[in-house]
Image (cartoon, helix red, strand yellow):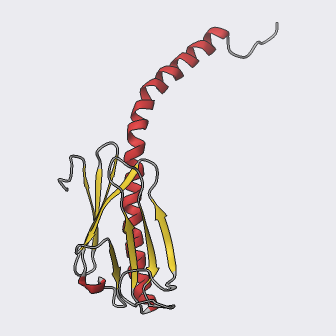
Amino acid sequence: MRNKSGFTLIEVIIVMGVIGIMSAIAFPMVSNWLPNYRLRGEARNLYSNMQRIKLEAVRRNSDVGISFTTVAFPAVGGRYQAFIDDGSGVGGVAGNLIQDGTEATLFQIPMSASCSLVIASFSGNSAVGFNSRGLPSRNWFGSAVMRNDRSKWYRISLGIAGSTRIESSSDGMNWN
């Protein structure tokens, strides 16, 4: 007598049906979770990059700025870029928080899919930076706000002493 191993057609159909039902249940949860995950990642990335430019300013003993380009919601996008604000090149002015002359760009970060950089206000300006002591240049402080199409918001705030923090909100801009 031969020993037959394998699956019958009915067993395969039942397993495929169970996988289909589980996928139908899991897909809506994942599709709602993914935009919030991306936004949280963008907020953490900006927070980390602000810490990075603070350290870079101290290391270089020079001002380092970060400028923001915002979009009006519901548009998706926006970006920020960091630069050495040392006044190098013709027409460059050190410490003005404007990338002019031939001031070097450290990095440029665009927002990922479904994320919008909607507000950047630092003492009324869309740029901020750190001086060689790790303090905000020109004593400017404020925040950058990001959101996604699921009404989740993140704010990255810079205090007058150079401290940064992340806050989240799921109902407008009522921060936790």
| Residue shown at 52% from the left, 21% from the top | 20
Give the x, y percent position of residue 85: 42, 85
Q: Which of 7 and 12 is in front in this view?
A: 12
On the image, which quarter does residue 94 sit in? bottom left
Left or right: 6 in relation to 168: right
Give the x, y percent position of residue 70: 36, 61
Q: In which quarter of the image is the N terminus?
A: top right
Left or right: 59 in relation to 166: right
Give the x, y percent position of residue 42: 41, 58
- Vertical side of 12 occupied by 26: above or below: below
| Residue shown at 32% from the left, 42% from the top | 150
Left or right: 6 in relation to 95: right
On the image, which quarter does residue 52 sit in? bottom left
Tally of numbered tags? 0
- Vertical side of 3 occupied by 66: above or below: below
Toward the front, the furthest residue is: 91
- Vertical side of 76 occupied by 30: above or below: above
On the image, which quarter does residue 40 sit in? bottom left
| Residue shown at 42% from the left, 36% from the top | 31
| Residue shown at 50% from the left, 91% from the top | 90
Give the x, y percent position of residue 164: 29, 72
